[in-house]
Amino acid sequence: MTRFSFWAASALASCLLSTVIQAAGIPKAVSAAVADPARPQEDKDRDANRKPAEVVAFAGIKPGDKVVDLLAGGGYFTRIFSGVVGPKGKVYTVGFPPRPNAPAGAPNPLAAIAADPHYSNVTVVSGRVNELTLPEPVDVIWTSDNYHDLHNAPGDIVPGFNKKMFDLLKPGGTFIVTRPVIVGISICSPSAASHGASGTSRSRSWPLTRKSACGSRWICR
């Protein structure tokens, strides 16, 4: 069964998953990837809010997996996934389309990661997200803080996008969507099926709950 997991980013992990993760323990591969001294300091400075060990452990990413980091920004999770899946795994990192006003020759941070021998299992994939092609089926597709923006794209691309993501997964693969949380506002998502995803999906909605441990933010649980 393909799993389609919606989860709220940042505050989510510390409040909703910490008890479970602490009881089970963070997998060694995940801990090592987060602690990797090759990670940029600016990425490490964001760890307190993004809780990478907790959310990656929740996603079930493990050594040998094939993972897509979709709309990966500067590669914060790309680097971590590279360390977790190891030399027998693969990370396909997909950036944002170039902005129309971007200067010619602007550096591509994802290309720089893929060119670094430390991240030799990373490959940059280009193209529109709803037309994405990969050389092989993958275990996990991950997108962080971006899914809601698809609804702002010209035309209704979300149904086709969901179907495309499911088509790229191996049987039993996982599509992880982390979602931002705005103070006082819930943007928990309905099921993937309501957006036109094919196949079997599983999702969950969470009522609003105020958690002081999350820095007095509203979170979805």
Image (cartoon, rainbow, N blue to C red):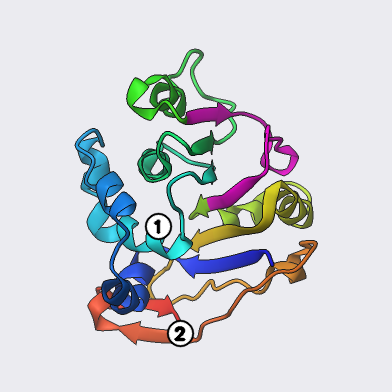
2 or 1: mark nearer the eye:
1
Q: Nearer the viewer, residue 173 or 48?
A: 173
Q: Position of residue 18 (x, y in %)?
A: 30, 74
Q: Which mark is residue 93?
A: none
Mark 1 Cα-neighbour bin, 10 Å: few <14, some 14–19, many ≥20: many
**Residue 16, above or below 90:** below
**In the image, what residue occupies the spot 32% across and 76% down?**
15
Q: Quadrant of residue 137?
A: top right
Q: Does any portion of residue 83 appear in the rendered image?
A: yes
Q: Who's the residue at 54% across and 60% down the image? A: 177
Choose top left, top right, bottom left or bottom right for residue 12: bottom left
Q: What is the magenta range?
A: 122-142
Q: Which residue is mark 1?
A: 56
Q: Look at the numbered disc 2 and give the secondary structure of its residue.
A: strand
> Which residue is the site of mark 2?
208
User: Is 138 inside the magenta-drawn segment?
Assistant: yes
Q: Residues within 10 Å of mark 2 (few under 14, many from 20)?
A: some
- Amino acid, disc 2: Leu
Q: Where residue 92 sits in the image (x, y, percent)?
A: 54, 36
| Front residue of 208 and 133 | 133
- Mark 1: amino acid: Val
Q: Position of 196 compared to 211: left or right?
A: right
Picture quarter with the C terminus:
bottom left
Q: Where residue 147 appears, x then y in whole percent?
A: 58, 56
For this view, does 85 lie left or right of residue 153? Answer: left
Q: Secondary structure at mark 1?
A: helix
